[in-house]
Image (cartoon, grey):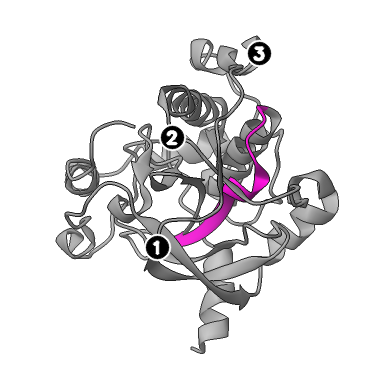
Amino acid sequence: MTKLAKLFALVGLCGVWAPHQVISAPLNVQRWAPQESLHGEWISDGEFVLAPMRFIRFCIQNPAECKAGEQTAVVALDDFARQQMNEVNQAVNARIAPAYASAGNLDWSITRTYGDCNDYAVQKRHRLLELGWPASALSLAVVVTPFGEGHLILTVRTNRGDVVLDNLRQKIVSWNRTGYRFIKRQSKMSPAYWVEVKGKGLPSTDRIIAVNARGPSAPFNAAIENKTEAKSQPPHLNADREADSTETDDQTDLKQTAVESVDTAEPEDL
């Protein structure tokens, strides 16, 4: 398979599980365990590459989500920024019901309450934009999970390195501590375009700004308080969930082991 074909293949796959719910797969988990490294690593962006096809459709449907800001900037990772990122990450994770049967086949949405990793990622970016965060600091990224599956997350550029908001985690972690292989992400210069991820880079020289001191609105935080309520989703999803619940004890043990191998190597909560 060519490099281009592989990039297209990744777009159609997505991790849609709730935290600590991962599919079993025959692989050596330790090979993907995060390596020890200092806190505060930056991603090195490379040349422009093709954007995911569903992202292009998303931009057509939601042009405001793909506009560039007035100038590039990174966020000052202070206590308020940490708190706001954690609130947004946890609220969106609680708000959206995983759409197991439709993973990778749905248009990306900033309003839907069921979906896959794409919906989690774009809704987190949308909410941070609403809260006044700079567009250049918020980049969707395509990665490969420890299970070899394409996945979409949100990376945030800060003065202390790039961090990740993920529907597979409740914690905010440094990008190099996720255990993921990074493929490409949105350009900081123009969010409508994507660039390859080359690996670790140098600290950003962009302007550092502190986010506005205003928290998520009451209706948004209500997603955490009401997460036990029924979530709007297609009728067939309940049947799919019941079918998924018939997994064997061995499969359950493998899932928990895989999650622990990644989460136990994470740094302190941001």
Which residue in the protein does label 1 denote?
A: 202
Q: Quadrant of residue 243?
A: top left
Please name the residue shown 75% across and 52% down the image.
68
Visible in this render: residue 113? no
Q: How many marks?
A: 3
Residue type, numbered disc 3: Pro
Q: For residue 134: magenta?
A: yes
Visible in this render: residue 156? yes
Please name the residue shown 62% across and 33% down the image.
128
Residue 45 in the image, given as x and y percentages of width and height = 51, 68
Pointer 1 local density, CA inside 10 Å: few below 14, some 14–19, many at least 20: few
In the shown orientation, is residue 148 left or right of residue 206? left
Q: Quadrant of the C terminus?
A: top left
Label 1, label 3: how far apart the Cα atoms are: 39 Å
Q: Quadrant of residue 12?
A: bottom right
Which one is earlier in the sequence, the residue at label 2 or at label 3? 2
In the shown orientation, is residue 137 left or right of residue 112? left
Residue type, numbered disc 1: Leu
Q: Residue furthest bottom?
A: 2
Label 2, label 3: how far apart the Cα atoms are: 25 Å
Residue 155 in the image, given as x and y percentages of width and height = 49, 49
Which residue in the protein does label 3 denote?
A: 219
Range drawn in magenta:
131-144
Please name the residue shown 58% across and 36% down the image.
124
Pointer 2 local density, CA inside 10 Å: few below 14, some 14–19, many at least 20: many
Residue 177 in the image, given as x and y percentages of width and height = 28, 51
Image height of 153 relative to 215, above or below: below
Res. 77 mark = 2
Residue 193 in the image, given as x and y percentages of width and height = 69, 65
Residue type, numbered disc 2: Leu
